[in-house]
Image (cartoon, grey):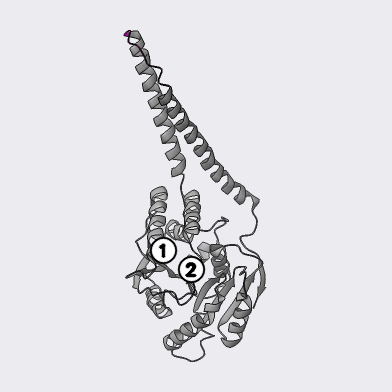
Amino acid sequence: MQFSIVIPIYGDGYLARNCCEELQHVFQAYFEKTDISADMELIFINDGSPNNSLEILKEVRNDFNFVKVVDLSRNFGQHAAIACGFQLASGKYVMRMNVDCQDPPSEAPKLLDAVRTGQYDLVIGQYRKRNSPLMDRITSKLYFWIFELFTGLRSPPHTSPMRVMNRTFVDVYNSLTEKARFPQGLDQWLGFRHHYVEIIHRERADGKSSYNFRKRLRLALTGILYFSDRPLKFIAGIGLAFALIGALLGTFVVVQKLLGATVMPGYTSLAAIGLIGFGVQVGSTGVLGLYLGRVFTEVQNRPLYIVREIL
């Protein structure tokens, strides 16, 4: 098998047929043959879809002989589904993409050709222009800004979910053991030889993306907690700053007393300082709790996903 494509599905199985038709057309031309099932496989991971996506995927599987369908026992999250697809992919090169085809399948050969040169281990699509609603573009920029600020991991702007990796990269990725997967961060952390290829970005074929601001924020939080201890350092810095302010105020009051000056009680300022300090303490405890919760998840050592059926 030369090429594997991994696509997670959560409620958007209705887009699968159109996606398969586009991919079939593109790779029939790429491989210069009508039957491409010996050269590529398309793995749909049904991540506990709440609608009839699984039934649709089964129908698509019957019509396209290069399609495989994996049904997880429940919803484990997009990145767990992607990890499942990587484990099952048998291709020499593996690509992940979304079923909405906002990253057109016609762009995939660009990435595949680049990685097949042997110069790169991971080739990532980079948008020439992002054709998404304004709010999606704003939240996406905010998400990457927060992630880079707290982790120090940087990637070029407007990178695409569409990316192709060689077998070496996939095997190393599959050897990772953490339960919370954050591919953007893991791609950077693993290193290897990265390359970016400019691709077009078109409007979603149908429906609306399930990645709203809340999910993007949660994803950014997961990336921060798993890839950096900067929040803890930030909290330590705030605590030190408040301690210094308190020491300076105390010194100021003592000096004023020694000089015989009258020191005003300042109940309002003391109350404000007390409330700020209390808020910092509660917030600090909350951040520590988030890190502890991630540790608890890891030491449970439960499977990243559970496969119910493979077609």
Q: Quadrant of residue 163?
A: bottom left
| Secondary structure mostly taken by the magenta-highlighted segment of the chain | loop
**Span shown in magenta:** 259-265
Q: Of the residues shown, which amino acid type is indicated by label 2?
A: Ser
Mark 2 touches mark 1? (CB < 8 Å): yes
> Label 2: few (<14), some or many (≥20) within 10 Å?
few
- Which residue is at the front of the view, 254 or 243? 254
In this rendering, position of residue 257 left or right of residue 24:
left
Q: Of the residues shown, which amino acid type is indicated by label 1?
A: Asp
Q: Mark 1 falls on what kind of element? A: helix
Which x, y percent locates residue 105?
43, 79
Instruction: Find the distance from the CA under tag 2 to the CA under tag 1.
Output: 10 Å
First in residue order: circle 2 vs circle 1: 1
Q: Quadrant of residue 47?
A: bottom right
Q: Which residue is mark 2?
A: 209
Which x, y percent locates residue 226?
50, 51
Which x, y percent locates residue 90?
55, 75
